[in-house]
Image (cartoon, grey):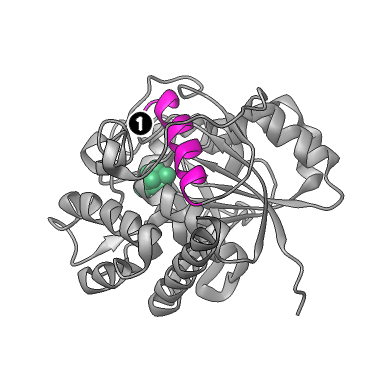
Amino acid sequence: MSNAKIPVIIDCDPGIDDAVALALAFGCGKLDVLGVTTVAGNTTGENTYHNARRFLSFIGADVEVARGADKPILRPLITAPDVHGKAGLGGLSGAEDSGMDDDDRDTSGRSALDLITETLLNHGEKVTLVPVGPLTNIAIALLARPEIKHKIERIVLMGGAALEGNRTPAAEFNIIADPEAARIVFESGVPITMVGLDVTHKALIYPDEIEALRKHGRIGMAIAELMDFYGVFYRKRFEGNPVHDALAVAAVFESDIVSTRLLNVCVETSGEFTLGRTVVDFRGVTGRKPNCDVALGVDRERFINLIFDAVKTLEQQSQRRF
Ligand code: RIB
Ligand code: CA
């Protein structure tokens, strides 16, 4: 069992669950996060970029953040203010008392495209891409520099659903936000793990667990506050909160936290009622080559423990900084 950290690039649209995913990525101690790229999705590209920078500063993560697409490849931008708030981080968006500083970090000036392609081509070993928002940046990189494919270990994405959607009955938000980008990624030939709603809706964090988070300093308090805001939307539908993006991160360094099946997945880019559907061929009736490890089962308790462990680690590191 190697102790070496897994090299990853995280592409995100913070976004409340994106923030928890970043906390897990930097608190788990198992990932070498080579860069974070942002994409418009839960909120505008301006907001996701600054939210990522501010939250990463807040958790003490010193990593390059590069801004990506402000809209999908072909379609108008759709956002999710009802879930994440207009600015994207619920009650922590810009509130003076959020504890998060203004965004005063230096900037590399690189675009998401340059960070992704240059990192992949220059890194000594293959890199795992972890997109947890619309797939626009990943698709653009694959189109612009197809030679990056042989430097990608795997794409572990949060998105899609074999069964029910969330933005429409057929489609999950990250996929329908940019269906053409998703199709480019799923047809790329790169190994993919799809961490979709089939598992994120089973790996809920419950109110008593959110309360327990509050006992872990400023980091735990902030994550709990994000969960409080998120819960206003989700409590109408579930007993707990699905922390979608964090489960994709967990599946990178503990791949068996989800159980998967290698199946063919195609993305619908033209259906009147099914646009953005990840069409999963469970029975192989299409004869199309399997292209994706589809997550269907999950160990919820193990996942929640990973979040707590990461929050505790980040809080201990935070206390050493101040
Ligand atoms: O459908 C859930 C996904 O859409 C998550 O990534 C959430 O952050 C939003 O981007
Ligand atoms: Ca997201």
51 is within the stretch colored magenta:
yes
The answer to whether residue 66 is seen in the rendering is yes
Q: Is residue 40 left or right of residue 290?
A: left
Image position, residue 27 (x, y; %): 54, 62
- If the image is split into quadrants, where does the N terminus sit? bottom right
Give the answer, above or below, for where 145 lies relative to 90: above
Q: Residue furthest left?
A: 236
Image position, residue 69 (x, y; %): 52, 24
Q: Is residue 282 left or right of residue 116?
A: left
Which residue position holds label 1? 43
**Residue at (76, 29) in percent of width and height:** 145
Between residue 263 and residue 205, name the one nearer to us: 205
Image position, residue 198 (x, y; %): 37, 62
115 is within the stretch colored magenta:
no
**Residue at (46, 70) in percent of width and height:** 312
- The amino acid at mark 1 is Thr
Q: Secondary structure at mark 1?
A: loop
Image quadrant assignment for residue 95: top left
Between residue 49 and residue 276, name the one nearer to us: 49
**Residue at (21, 68) in percent of width and height:** 207
Image position, residue 287 (x, y; %): 59, 54
Give the answer, above or below, for where 20 lies relative to 303: above
Magenta stretch, residue numbers: 44-59
- Label 1 neighbour load within 10 Å: few <14, some 14-19, many 20+: many
Give the overall secondary structure of the magenta segment: helix
Q: Is label 1 within 8 A of ligand 1 (CB to nearest ligand atom)?
A: no
